[in-house]
Image: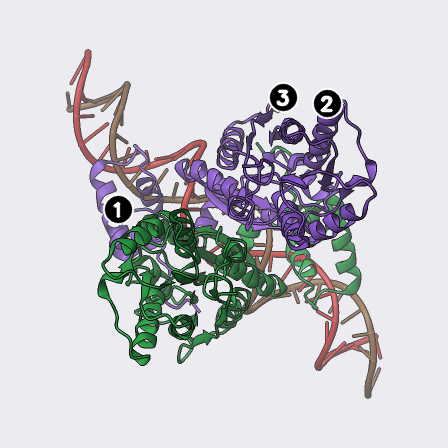
Chain colours: A purple, B green, C red, D brown
Amino acid sequence: MAQKPEITIHDIAKKLKISASTVSRALKDNPLISEATRHKIKKAAIEMGYRPNVMAANLRTRRTNTIGVIVPLINRHFFSSVISGIEDVAYNQGFAVTISQSNDNLEKESTIAHTLFSNRVDGLILSIGMETQSYDHLKLFSERNIPLVFFDRIVDEIPAHKIVVDDFGGAYRATQHLIEQGRKKVAHIGGPLNLQIYAKREAGYRKAISDAGLQINENQILHNSLTREDGLNAIKKILKTKERPDAIFCANDTTALSAIIHLNEKGIKVPEDIAIVGFSNEPFSELVTPSISTIKQPGFEMGQKAAELLIKQIGSKTKPKNYETIMMETELIVRNSSQQK
Amino acid sequence: MAQKPEITIHDIAKKLKISASTVSRALKDNPLISEATRHKIKKAAIEMGYRPNVMAANLRTRRTNTIGVIVPLINRHFFSSVISGIEDVAYNQGFAVTISQSNDNLEKESTIAHTLFSNRVDGLILSIGMETQSYDHLKLFSERNIPLVFFDRIVDEIPAHKIVVDDFGGAYRATQHLIEQGRKKVAHIGGPLNLQIYAKREAGYRKAISDAGLQINENQILHNSLTREDGLNAIKKILKTKERPDAIFCANDTTALSAIIHLNEKGIKVPEDIAIVGFSNEPFSELVTPSISTIKQPGFEMGQKAAELLIKQIGSKTKPKNYETIMMETELIVRNSSQQK
DNA sequence: AACAGAAATGCAATCGATTGCATTGATTAA
DNA sequence: TTAATCAATGCAATCGATTGCATTTCTGTT
């Protein structure tokens, strides 16, 4: 399609009767070039509509100034907050950010990782998908020493910086809160245990229950992919169990939502009959009736931190001696789904 | 950072004692290469962990097989649906997609456009930001014949394919629906008129009112950026006007939400006292109490269509003779905010 | 056995920017 | 005036893959 001739530094050089090297240096504000020529060159560049060909530069310098980001779904408030945090830091440091979503699908995640690698991103920030249990596509990066930072859904096996929230603590707090409301039989809708975050949330939940000297009913701990539909099936199953629980701690807000909607329809009162707490503080959680008590995660700050660590690592010549796992604090937000007015 | 030697086609060639050209051709399944050598080469490539350097290839071929996407906010359900639609088509056709958000900020939009251009994306799909009133950063593309497709928030001045929804019709339908509910005084919370979509929504609203022989109260047509906060200010302002309206057509769901929350707090009943219709069918619209009647836009399909048109244009040698503007149908979804049970 | 024609492979230039090293020109010191 | 010094610029190789054209190797035919 492109017919208008591409303007290159050579075109500028020819027009100004100087060498391409000088043009290149001038445009990069290299101090070797005199003020006068630099001005002349920049002026010409603008007049001629010069646009650097990043690929040529990248090929030569072996750097792209681009950070790749892979998230399961850009559509989740938590993830888009993280992305905004990443962009915030990256743009200020002159990095471009390219965002991709895996849709929680391993194959797509792998394809994206390979594409990003082939495009030679300088570093990768990611949160793995629910299906992801093999990590060849990620070893690609760590083996070649391309900086990698995980956030939220991390992988233990791969050495890298990791940014997580205190899932255990958050879940503990959430469950404790339900118990403080006088609940004795707390059920749990949890995520796939291959993801650490869900294992930890469940562990926090279990600890809170046993610390309070209460019993766990193993029939009332369910695992699924935490979609709207999964949540609906889960709440139905829970309602069919022998001793109906008086509270549910859900591993995300989506399933909390499903539960609430179903209970509303069934005429079971939330929180009077069954109290509910979710996780993530999705925007909708304050909009439903009753509004959902939940655990707030500092998404934006996690993104900032992840980008900082990554960029620091990109800038350094050597592999970091040790990798940090940064745990950020969560906050319990009490709303109407767990507390009577 | 990268110390492990990069494997190039030359390394493969050396090892197999053949030429790099043959390796290149074999890896691209060029029929010139015999079955036997091709196999040998592919095997070696895998064993050696070869990963093509896309930048080098792109530099040579002047194609990147990458589509750039710019949206105001990835966080909006409508936009992320469109993105999913784009990805759906693009991936199947072997294109990568790089997504960026402008945050409705002209400067950022312009920076992103320049970055994408410098990275030589093969084409661009975008929806402009609220601030965008100058188009130099977009002319960059059209002038150099880099295919460009607009969706939703389009720019008339620039020749390109455009995918829109029937904003006029949707708004007309929404307003008409309010009138059918017996409402006589319908206010409007609208967006910035420099964006065609909002101008059209307002026009549709006006037409429906006058077609019904009703009066418009110009004090009750407000314009703002349609954020939560803007919506709150707008509803407050509307409540202070002389003749309180009995319905409001909001140009998006966000402001409809603000209005509903504020009216709930004030004890003004929705829909009994004031009926409300929004626009876009954001997921939260069915979750609030009362649930929000709204206009549904086919986001996924718009994305698919945009990607199809773009890729077709990328593949063609010549400029399209005429540019299409495809208008997709909207659907009124009646919920509780506009209809008494 | 010889040769046309096809099939397979190689050569070398190219894409556009960068950069180590060489060169030019100007300035300064002696 | 001349050599030494420094500032400014140019030369040419390089990054890795692609591709038009040339060359080599087969294959089959007579």
Does the CB distance between marks 1 and 2 fall below 8 Å?
A: no
Q: Amino acid at mark 3?
A: Asn
**Residue B9 seen:** no
State the residue at coordinates (70%, 28%). A204
Q: Amino acid at mark 2?
A: Ala
Neighbour class for label 1 at 10 Å: few (<14), some, many (≥20)? some
Above or below, comparing residue A168 to residue B228 in the picture: above
**Residue A118 seen:** yes
Residue A257 lies, in percent from the top left, at 62, 48
Q: Chain of mark 3?
A: A
Q: Chain of mark 2?
A: A
Secondary structure of the residue carrying numbered label 3? loop
Residue B172 lies, in percent from the top left, at 38, 74
Secondary structure of the residue carrying numbered label 2? loop
How far apart are the alpha carbons under marks 1 and 2?
Answer: 71 Å
Between circles 2 and 3, the one closer to the viewer is: 2
Q: Amino acid at mark 1?
A: Lys
Q: In the visual, does A241 lie left or right of B332?
A: right
Residue A244 lies, in percent from the top left, at 77, 42
Q: Which mark is residue A322?
A: 3
How far apart are the alpha carbons under marks 2 and 3?
Answer: 38 Å
Q: Chain of mark 1?
A: A
Nearest to N terminus: mark 1 or mark 2 = 1
Does the CB distance between marks 1 and 3 fall below 8 Å?
A: no
